[in-house]
Amino acid sequence: MDTNNNRLNAKDLINVGVYTAICAVICCAVAISGVIPVMMLFLVVFVPILTGIPYMMFLTKVKKFGMILILNILMGALMWVTGMSYYALVVGTIAGLIAEYIYRAGGYMSKWHGIAAYAISGLYCWANYFGIFFNAEAYFSTRQNFGQEYIDAVTRLLPAWMCPVLMIVDVLCGIIGGWIGTKLLKKHFVKAGIA
Amino acid sequence: MEYKLDRNTHSLLDPRTKLLLLFTSSVFVVGSAGEQRMRVFYWILVFIPVFLLFMEKEWKAGGAAVTIYVGSYFAQIALQHELTALESVLALMLYIITKIIPTVILARYIVRTTKVSEFLTAMHKMKVPDKITIPVSVIFRFFPTVIEESRAIGDAMRMKGIEMGAKKATEAVEYRMVPLIASCSIIGEELSAAAMSRGLDVGKKRTCIWNIKMGFFDWVIIVLCLVCFIWWGIGGLFI
């Protein structure tokens, strides 16, 4: 009986799909602004903060092991298909697994565990920068048409030491986004009885 | 017993072929792997979505796509020299058009012509676990819904005088995001109720009214995709 209750059923899987779609649409809307070099750097700020709201809503639906992991795998796969590198998929899967364990440690209801899980699982956003750091030539060869100015601007903004800094920024913004998410959740959804 | 229904003529390709084509086109068109050596395949992959549009009798969209391609091809030739700031913005737009649009057309074609049950059956035949296929099919179905909802909410907010870049950015975000998530979560609930009543949870083998079979065009596309990958892998040895 117990094992049966812990298996993911159609309802859980549909919830995963719904929230992945919302997060992906928000990501796309934000990522389009990445064509401006400075905004490219701020993606790691805006994406975690904005997707925090649907994500915290999603976490209220998570009661079983595996849902966060599937969401992260799907987000990573979407990043790959839409022309980022496969780093997002790899990092997203690992981060999703860690986040899963963190959230489980909180009994699937603890607020701070939820925020921590969100901050960790948002690392797929950071992974999108790997292409610039580790494989700069190949990365820009596909973007020659952006013009040399764009390439120069991005490289100037992203020296190698920015890699760990961006990770820290990503996690911090994840925490902020998760915190905002719980606030909004409390303000709007709990009252309305949705969450 | 196989139930014969002549409705499987409505879409030219099998869901599996469509996904393979989408993957190939995202590697070679969006990711532009292989560069010069893949030139011919690149253009073939760019024009397959247009061909599919014509097969679906969407003459207007197909014609527009061809015009855009041809125009941007000549414009790209014209923009080969040293670029000024304005021209690099133009080049950026061209880049987006030539790289993204074929895949967008393809993705739109897939969403429009693939029934969810068709997709699930095809994935089941490929032995992909439910845990991946159900969320993916929901995502496919949900993309248009999220965009539609957010557009409707945007209209409502504009009527109340709350616009993007209003006095407080937080307000603009909160007033858009909260209704969006609320309505999407309600739609999600309804969707899972519908799935429940269709017996997605039973765990038995599901049947499908459409016949999922590989046809002639499927094999053509599959061979083409495989040739793309093989040529990408070993083509360097011959040139």
Image (cartoon, rainbow, N blue to C red):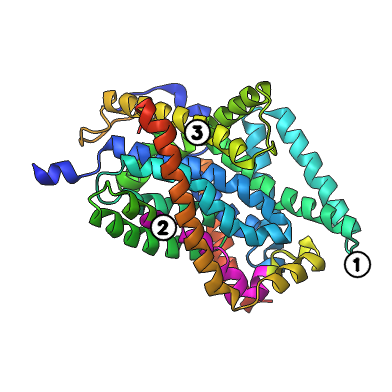
Q: Kindly identify which residue carries mark 3.
A: B178
Marks 1 and 3, how far apart at CA: 47 Å
Q: Amino acid at mark 1?
A: Glu
Query: Which chain letter goes with mark 3?
Result: B
Across and down, in percent, residue A101 comes to: 27, 59
Query: Which chain letter goes with mark 1?
Result: B
Which one is in front, B119 or B51?
B119
Across and down, in percent, residue B21 comes to: 54, 49
Q: Kindly identify which residue carries mark 1.
A: B82
**Same chain for the residues at labels 1 and 3, yes or no?**
yes
Which one is in front, B209 or B75?
B75
Label 1 element class:
loop
Q: Which residues are magenta?
A: A116-139
Q: Residues within 10 Å of mark 1 (few under 14, many from 20)?
A: few
Q: Residue at x 58, y 36 (%)?
A: B109
Across and down, in percent, residue B161 comes to: 68, 25
Q: Amino acid at mark 3?
A: Val
Which one is in front, A47 or A25?
A47
A117 left or right of B163?
Answer: left
Q: Is residue B213 visible?
A: no
